[in-house]
Amino acid sequence: MAKRLALCGVFCFAAANRPVVLVPGLTGSGLEVKQHAAAMPHWYCKKDTHDKWMKAWVDPVQALPGEVDCLIARLTLTYDAASDTYSNLANVELRALGWANGTGASGLTTVNSSYVNESYVNSVNSAHGLDLLYSYEFGPMLKKLESRGYALGKDVFLAPYDWRLAGDAHAQRKNGVGGYYQQLQQLIEEIVEASGQPAVVLSHSLGCPTMLHFFHLYVSEAWRARHIHGWLALSGPWTGGASQVMAYLGGWTLGLPSWLVPHDYVRPVQVNASSGVWMTPHPKGFGNRTLVVTPSRNYTAADMPDMVKLIGGEGWGRQTGSLFSKLQPSLAEIQSPPSGMHMESWYSTGVPTIEGLVYDTDLSEGFNQAPSKTIRGEGDGLVNLVSLSQVEKVWPSSTTTRVFANCSHFGILSDPRVLEALVEYLSEKPAPVFV
């Protein structure tokens, strides 16, 4: 009883509402950093946050010239294959911003380099309202749910995570990196206990393989049956996407608008991230399709590890090459619906999507060029149809799929058809009440 009373101070539910947990996609989680005498690339980079959390992702101020180098240092992720461990830059700690309620109410400070006007930054990024990134992603969805009696932090919860990481790091915390799955499991258990109803998990983009790994390898079938009413997977890149290839060869905006994230903004972070391996075209889905054309060689999904090592040399190429060997096989092994719960895969089509890149020169170490020609095909503008439709093609028929025509990868989060379908889904059959 004491635990339930304590929970009521945080989670207060309307009895009729089934709790909903929102899991963002790649770059869709805000990140904040705590630093203590951290080694930064420039004198003007803030090196010490004096035991306070500072916003690191995403802040338009950090797009200022020179500031990008500071951000890249803060987001640096190193993987050591010998010890199978990840680490941040020394004396840098990262965490997801806005756990559960999506706001900076925990006391984050949006302070960047010493020359940035602090009052201006705080006026742009309110520390007391929904973060700009979450408002961009989930604003229309939250508004729709609010019209049906839901409220963020009451029966709708955000579960952001360190989007640099894949499932292996989420499953355990080492060197101050990872551990998301334990935090997520605890959140779901608490809201289910407080509400008396199993939860609905709605994931988007990278959040889909992130949850696939969680459901298959982190929790049991009995746990899923008790705590999860259903899983709605939106725009899942089940076998990656060709856009990630552009990230390796020259950088891209990660699907976010150019006014928020300039081209080539954090390419060194993209190519080092273990999540990037999950987002890279997988041979199981893309087969022998040609993804990159150069004067002397064509590259398919099976050639991606070699391509990364070739252009990365001794730096990130070696690290990312090790991650391919570690992470790609395990992702292929869990391509099936988790038992003990209902799953639906919703995706969109009708938006030209990168499926091939043509370059006038051969790839070499340090390669960083825009393609001379971009070949586009069917998809949602970010993920190719061959990856989006993986579920209905090769998974058992127990998984329900829904397709929304002429809707983009991010647009699926605000499309009126999708929002209405979500409301209908949440209204189906009263959930059992635990006693």
Image (spheres, helix red, strand yellow):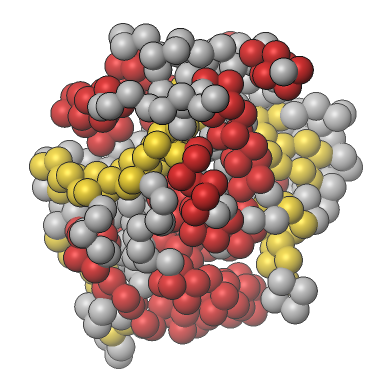
Query: x, y (%) of residue 395?
Result: 27, 64
Q: Is residue 216 above or below residue 70?
A: below
From the viewer's perspective, tell me whether residue 420 is left or right of residue 187: left
Farthest residue in the front direction? 435
Q: Nearer the viewer, residue 378 or 9?
A: 9
Q: Residue at x 78, y 45 (%)?
A: 92
Up the image or down, 302 lies above or below 221; here it is: below
Residue at left 48%, top 19%? 155
Q: Is residue 14 left or right of residue 376?
A: right
Left or right: 204, with 109 as reference point:
left
Q: Is any atom of residue 416 visible in this view?
A: yes
Q: Position of residue 263 (x, y in %)?
A: 41, 48
Quadrant in the rendering for residue 51: top right
Q: Tell me if I can see residue 354 in this picture.
A: no
Image quadrant where one finds the N terminus? top right
Residue drawn 39% across the image and 47% down it: 341
Q: Is residue 131 left or right of residue 31?
A: left
Image quadrant holding the C terminus, namely top right
Q: Quadrant of residue 166?
A: bottom right
- Position of residue 348 relative to residue 151, above or below, is below
Q: Position of residue 143 (x, y in %)?
A: 34, 14
* 372 relative to 306, above or below: above
Count all numbered tags in the image, as a single digit: 0
Residue 284 in the image: state x and y as whole percent.
Answer: 32, 76
What residue is drawn where x is 39% and y is 14%?
A: 16
Q: Nearer the viewer, residue 110 or 393?
A: 393
